[in-house]
Amino acid sequence: MTLRVLLVAASVGLVATVVLGGVALRSDRAREAHRQALVDAASEGVLALIDVHTATADADVDRLRSLSTGAFADELNDGGSGFVKSIRDSVVNSDGRVDEAALASESGASGVVVVAASAQVSNAAGPAAGRTYRLRVGVDEVDGRLLMSSVEFVP
């Protein structure tokens, strides 16, 4: 009887360990997926910010607006038409790319992502030139979507 009780107890312990390990692994994977989603959202938003063209300025700014929320969206809504006018008046064509992005911090569904990006920019003022950008991007979840809530250019 004692051996049987020990075997049952050992079996229950083994099953509990396997179940808890599976739950922990699943939780880790979900958290890592969320972290990657924060980085992806920031990268997509930064690309929308730096990849703009004279011929598609309205659509470019509309796309940027659709990826934004909070204070950053408010700034775009207040000055978005000026941004489009500036792109057109200066005949700006900027082919941007995100070079690197990493999660700097996370709090619940929100995060801060640091992004290194570059662009080949031409405008009416002179020949095309390469530009590099370092940005700190706040990302918040709104109605199930991850959107840029703040953008700060950093040295």
Image (cartoon, rainbow, N blue to C red):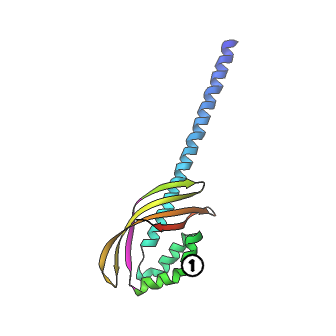
* Residue 103 x, y percent position in the rendering: 48, 55
- In the displayed structure image, the side of residue 9 where residue 101 appears, left or right: left
Query: What's the magenta bit mostly, secondary-structure-wise?
Result: strand
SS state under label 1 = helix
Residue at 64% across, 64% down: 143
Q: Which corner quadrant of the image does residue 127 belong to? A: bottom left
Judge whether residue 138 is colored magenta: no
Give the residue pinned by disc 1: 77
Q: Quadrant of the C terminus?
A: bottom left
- In the displayed structure image, the side of residue 145 where residue 125 appears, left or right: left
Q: Which corner quadrant of the image does residue 24 belong to? A: top right
How many C-alpha atoms fall within 10 Å of the one at disc 1: few (<14), some, or many (≥20)? Answer: some
Q: In the rendered image of this protein, does residue 32 appear above or below residue 101?
A: above
* Residue 128 x, y percent position in the rendering: 30, 77
Residue at 59% across, 32% down: 18
- In the displayed structure image, the side of residue 61 where residue 89 appears, left or right: left
Q: Nearer the viewer, residue 74 or 119?
A: 74
- For the view shown, which residue lies furthest in the front direction? 155
- For the view shown, which residue lies furthest in the left direction? 127
Which residues fall within the magenta stretch? 90-100
Q: Nearer the viewer, residue 3 or 127?
A: 127
Residue at 38% across, 81% down: 92
Q: Amino acid at mark 1?
A: Asn
Judge whether residue 91 is colored magenta: yes
Q: Nearer the viewer, residue 55 or 94?
A: 94
- For the view shown, which residue lies furthest in the right direction? 1
Q: In the rendered image of this protein, does residue 3 appear above or below residue 138?
A: above
Q: Quadrant of the N terminus?
A: top right
* Residue 51 x, y percent position in the rendering: 42, 73
